[in-house]
DNA sequence: TATTGTCGTGTAAACGTTTACACGGAGCTG
DNA sequence: CAGCTCCGTGTAAACGTTTACACGACAATA
């Protein structure tokens, strides 16, 4: 049968307490007994029963990751970043991505049953009241991935969307010489999308450019949405010289629309995106976009979460102040924009 | 403090056993007591201690997924496929991807400690002896993702690489009229890569075409590798008319090499890939490749694994025969190949 | 020598659940 | 009415660890 701590104790002629201590490197046990027990353990191929250990320690050593559905570009890198840190700290990661069988709320509830995970990293498009409600019932630390500024009561790690959008718009104006720059937004309720739009507007304003309402079209972060929006822009009597798409998927839609119009990027119209997803480097011409260090985002959130878990009770009692970390982004100069007299 | 089953028992004036039964929908408990207990539970926001439950049931309800490092294109879809099935069967998924801090073997060992996961889905480039050794020590069901035919003693789910490679090569010959078709292989030890090469060779042979050794170049499934291999092919005195790359990343490398030669796809040379990763649809021209239903692969392996877990002891005793499931693939007709006189 | 401290180990409780078994009462059968 | 069955519930053990506390031996100190 499976060999337990009791079995080892019998063979080594010591108590189970000593065995337990030896296996956990308790300095209190005499080196000789420790060695005896350890050699016996490896000889009998003893494997601790994690379930029993977790039970008494009240820890699962698992970090839960809750993801929305549409994160194709992010998924891999984000999880890798978390996984790296988690592994180094002795944690495993459990993913609950949203699909037809499971909503974000359900994932949270599933995770907040005592003991499933020790903490949660949550990426949600927006924080609805129902979601906040579910979170409030959660007795474990939660780190929210969001660049939003109105989440005082939560720990957050996010991309500085405003700064990124400002930077690339400023780049399009100052370095590329564009004056007529359109913007295709993200989903209306998406906090990231709103910040990007705000950064775009501020950059126009700071450069003394007129904001043309016709050049701001609603998108939804998808290829299809970008394509439709771009078609509308290209059909305007006064066409923009460049288009800043709120994310790379939207930019890809623009590529398709521009091609279908028989026009050329960047000769006829410049395109810029946001995210620098894996695909972007393979587009022709290579997309000019904002590089979002997703893996870094994962790592940072995991570091913060493990720290909160370690703090344990102290933290949960609200003594500690919440942290809000913003990760800044840089412009990736591709070939989808060119200097414009 | 946290409310336990004992607390509920006290309030409902019944024994903890009855509470436990009520919470688990045991038909033996009288409807009235059941309702009382359930209403009490929701009123006091009782959350079962999963750790305790898992401990006594000796189940974690977690499926472990072990992945190699270079699976960028697969990652998302594969995990989604597994996650969908897992969720529907009440399982969670835990991912151990390989990175600098953790090898595949380490992941297996981590998972094979009693209780961490109930079963493992393993994707490995090749099954080394050390890996087999680690697996043999594993007391839980394992499903291996592999299309290889020499893994009799394991349950496997895999892509039919031979068939896919045969199909696309046959397509290049019969439908596109190519006669000089080169191949860039995958890593020498990769079982998938070998099968693809075999399919390619068989298709040439069945169509009565001469196999030119110069046209078979070693690659490594990476963009860089594909680029280098393609450069060599394009420098040959007798150039091939088309190149069948062993995967899409390699094909992307070919795109780069062809461009750097000032040539055009598909006018000067046809390119075909394998995998139909997310990126491929955005390449210009759209890559002609073999569609691998990755999500289906994930789903199928998860179904098989959960079944094995359910079978439990019976299965582990080796009474049941191992299953070997192959998922067949289809050619995706893109624009990177054209009819050739 | 008496006291104190340290070291290494053992004893036993505790963690929260599930579940085999026992048990009492009610309803049926003969 | 004795005996049997079935239903609903309670009792208590079991799961494999960790760990607070106790304890004895031995060394150092006064």
Image (cartoon, coloured by chain):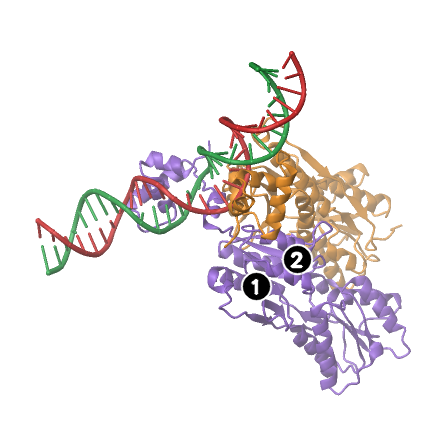
Chain colours: A orange, B purple, C green, D red
Badge 2 crowding class, 10 Å Cα cut-off, few under 14, some 14 to 19, many 20 or more, is many
Mark 2 lies on residue: B67
Residue B232's mark?
none
Badge 1 crowding class, 10 Å Cα cut-off, few under 14, some 14 to 19, many 20 or more, is many
Callout 2 and callout 1 share a chain: yes
Residue A199's spot in the image, x, y percent?
Answer: 74, 40
Note whether residue B166 is visible: yes
Note whether residue A127 is visible: no
Quarter residue C23 falls in: top left
C-alpha gap between disc 2 and disc 1: 14 Å
Point out the tag, 2 or 1, that comes first from the N-terminus: 2
Farthest residue to the bottom: give it: B208
Q: Chain of mark 2?
A: B
Q: Secondary structure at mark 1?
A: helix
* Residue A31 drawn above or below residue A7: above
Q: Chain of mark 1?
A: B
Question: Which one is in front, A229 or A95?
Answer: A95
Mark 1 lies on residue: B301
Tags 2 and 1 touching, CB below 8 Å: no
Q: Secondary structure at mark 2?
A: strand
Question: Which one is in front, A116 or B237?
Answer: A116
Question: Which one is in front, B313 or B13?
Answer: B313
Residue A14's spot in the image, x, y percent?
Answer: 54, 40
Residue A272's spot in the image, x, y percent?
Answer: 77, 51
**Residue at 59% of width from left, 67% of height from top?**
B156
The image shows a total of numbered marks equal to 2
Residue B76's spot in the image, x, y percent?
Answer: 64, 57
Position of A310 compared to B177: left or right?
left
* Residue B196 drawn above or below residue A167: below
Position of A83 compared to A130: left or right?
right
């Amino acid at each position: 049968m499976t060999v337990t701590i009791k079995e080892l104790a019998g063979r080594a002629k010591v108590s189970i307490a000593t065995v337990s201590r030896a296996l956990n490197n308790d300095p209190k046990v005499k080196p000789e007994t420790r060695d005896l027990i350890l050699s016996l353990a490896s000889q009998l191929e003893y494997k601790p029963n994690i379930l029993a250990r977790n039970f008494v320690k009240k820890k699962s050593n698992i970090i839960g990751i809750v993801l929305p559905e549409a994160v194709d570009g992010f998924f891999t890198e984000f999880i890798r970043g978390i996984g790296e840190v988690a592994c180094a700290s002795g944690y495993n990661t459990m993913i609950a991505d949203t699909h037809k069988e499971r909503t974000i709320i359900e994932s949270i509830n599933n995770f907040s049953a005592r003991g499933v995970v020790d903490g949660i990293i949550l990426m949600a498009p927006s924080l609805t009241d129902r979601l906040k409600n579910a979170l409030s019932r959660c007795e474990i630390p939660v780190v929210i991935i969001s660049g939003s500024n109105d989440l005082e009561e939560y720990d957050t790690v996010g991309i500085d969307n405003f700064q990124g959008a400002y930077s690339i718009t400023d780049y399009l104006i100052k370095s590329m010489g564009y004056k007529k720059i359109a913007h295709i937004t993200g989903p209306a309720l998406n906090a990231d999308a709103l910040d990007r739009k705000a950064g775009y507007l501020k950059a126009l304003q700071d450069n003394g450019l007129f904001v043309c309402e016709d050049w701001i079209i609603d998108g939804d972060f998808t290829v299809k949405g970008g394509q439709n929006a771009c078609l509308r822009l290209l059909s305007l009597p006064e066409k923009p010289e460049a288009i800043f798409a709120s994310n790379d998927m939207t930019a890809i839609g623009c590529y398709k629309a521009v091609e279908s119009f028989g026009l050329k990027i960047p000769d006829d119209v410049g395109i810029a995106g946001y995210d620098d997803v894996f695909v972007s480097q393979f587009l022709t011409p290579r997309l000019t976009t904002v590089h979002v260090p997703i893996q870094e985002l994962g790592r940072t959130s995991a570091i913060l979460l493990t720290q909160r878990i370690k703090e344990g009770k102290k933290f949960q009692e609200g003594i500690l102040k919440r942290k809000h970390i913003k990760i800044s982004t840089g412009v990736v100069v591709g070939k989808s924009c060119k200097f414009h007299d």
